[in-house]
Image: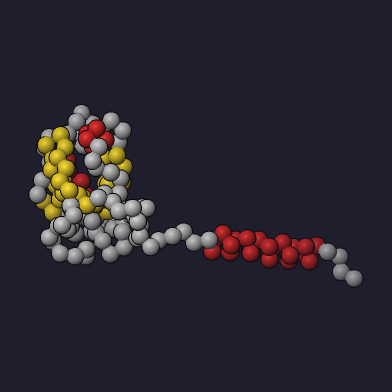
Amino acid sequence: MNGSLTPPADFEVIKLKRGPTGLGFNIVGGLDQPYVLNDTGIYVSKIKEDGAAALDGRLQEGDKILSINGVVLEDMPHKQVVDLFKRAGNHVELRVVKKTNSTRHPWRPAEWEPSPLPVFGLLLAFAVCAVLVVRKLRPSN
């Protein structure tokens, strides 16, 4: 789905030591729960304050995790990736592609922008209804 199994040349290796509360981040994505159009990759959705990832400082929300301890995560279901993280041990090596500035939300396509049309449509519908109500309530000659 998201290309070849060879990692991009611009990946970063991040080694974390599991803390008392785990690795300290949440993930989204996977084969069964893609969050980026045409991409089944795994993304960091939240860095937990004072967790191992936050204390290390390199992993950021929106980063794409390519592998954990050498296991490539491409085209894996979300639950299988979660299980890999749970069984990864105390020392974890992640291969990560850093979030680009153009991607505001990793789980949405970069070209996604909220549309003003739904709000405009609601206002237009309200205006039409108001006109109809006023005409109905106005006494006829």
Residue 128 in the figure: left or right of residue 94 = right
94, 21: nearer the viewer:
94
State the scheme by which the image is colored: secondary structure
**92 relative to 110, above or below:** above
Quadrant of the rendering where the N terminus is positioned: bottom left
36, 60: nearer the viewer:
60
Residue 101, given in percent of the width and then of the height, sits at 33, 53
Look at the image and tell me whether residue 84 can be seen: no
Rendered image quadrant of residue 8: bottom left
The residue positioned 74% from the left and 65% from the top of the image is 131
**128 relative to 69, above or below:** below
Residue 81 in the figure: left or right of residue 111 = left
The residue positioned 18% from the left and 54% from the top of the image is 10
Residue 63 in the figure: left or right of residue 8 = right
The residue positioned 87% from the left and 69% from the top of the image is 140
Residue 99 in the figure: left or right of residue 141 = left
Residue 21, given in percent of the width and then of the height, sits at 23, 31
